[in-house]
Image (spheres, rainbow, N blue to C red):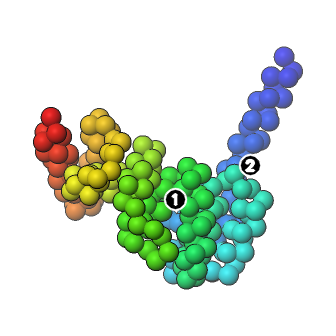
Amino acid sequence: MKWIYVIIATVFLMGSAMAQIADCDRLAANPPDPDRVTQGVPRSQVDLPAAIAACQADFAAHPDIFRFAYQLGRVYFYAGDTESALRFMGVSAEGGYRQAEFVYGAFINNRREGVPYNICEVEDYWLRSSRKGHVAARISYVRLVTKGVFEDCKIQATPADLRAFINIEMRGSSNYLSRLLVADLSQDVENYLQKRE
């Protein structure tokens, strides 16, 4: 019976260690990142040399925590080192970090220098992020699907996915334009699906 308590304590300590706020988080967390572990630092307030050094160290020590790779990619991008930014953002996206999946897809979609343009990769990254509940990815994904931007790709989302992605709670939202966008996209989804029946 004693071993059960040891296992529970170990799992608890491991979970606590994973959620600890590191220097990389304090210096480079992005306010819109839904998985940040601290408040986040606006771009204008990021101390780039300190943030790059901290994130390099934290990711080297914990290469399985893809939040650090994302944050390192973020600060490299702000520092103008696009090559390094793309490398670490890509590592984080491939590691399944949903904010990085969204941002890396945006890099491709926006035709950032140094990123080969492949709209079907955007479909894949944004779908993965959408299925993990990333709101910006969901809206962006549905918007491009209904506009026909992914028509040459294998659209992996099901009709149920598309409807679920736009089923965003907007009641009580003070953002009138966001409510309008979601309402319009909901109608666009239904029009898109009717054309394919």
Q: Position of residue 12 (x, y in %)?
A: 74, 37
| Residue 83 is at least partly visible in this image | yes
> Are there few (<14), some (14-19), or many (20+) residues within 10 Å of tag 2?
few
Q: Is residue 37 above or below residue 106?
A: above
The amino acid type found where label 1 is placed reads Ala
Q: Position of residue 83 (x, y in %)?
A: 58, 75
Q: Position of residue 186 (x, y in %)?
A: 20, 47
Q: What residue is at 40 percent from the left and 57 percent from the top?
A: 122
Q: How many marks?
A: 2
Q: Is residue 192 above or below residue 51?
A: above
Q: What residue is at 74 percent from the left and 56 percent from the top?
A: 62
Q: Residue 155 shows which numbered tag?
A: none
| Nearer to me, 124 or 20 | 124
Choose mark 1 or mark 2, whichever is in front.
1
| Nearer to me, 102 or 114 | 114
> Are there few (<14), some (14-19), or many (20+) residues within 10 Å of tag 1?
many
Q: Position of residue 194 (x, y in %)?
A: 13, 39
Toward the right, the furthest residue is 2
Helix, strand or loop for disc 2: helix
Q: Cα distance, mark 1 to mark 2?
A: 22 Å
| Nearer to me, 69 or 50 | 69
Q: What residue is at 22 percent from the left and 62 percent from the top?
A: 177
Helix, strand or loop for disc 1: helix
The amino acid type found where label 2 is placed reads Ala
Q: Evaluate if marks 1 and 2 touch, with contact meaning CB atoms under 8 Å apart.
A: no
| Residue 68 lies in quadrant | bottom right
Residue bearing mark 1: 100
Task: Give the position of the N terminus as an image quadrant.
Answer: top right
Residue bearing mark 2: 17
| Residue 85 lies in quadrant | bottom right
| Nearer to me, 33 or 99 | 99
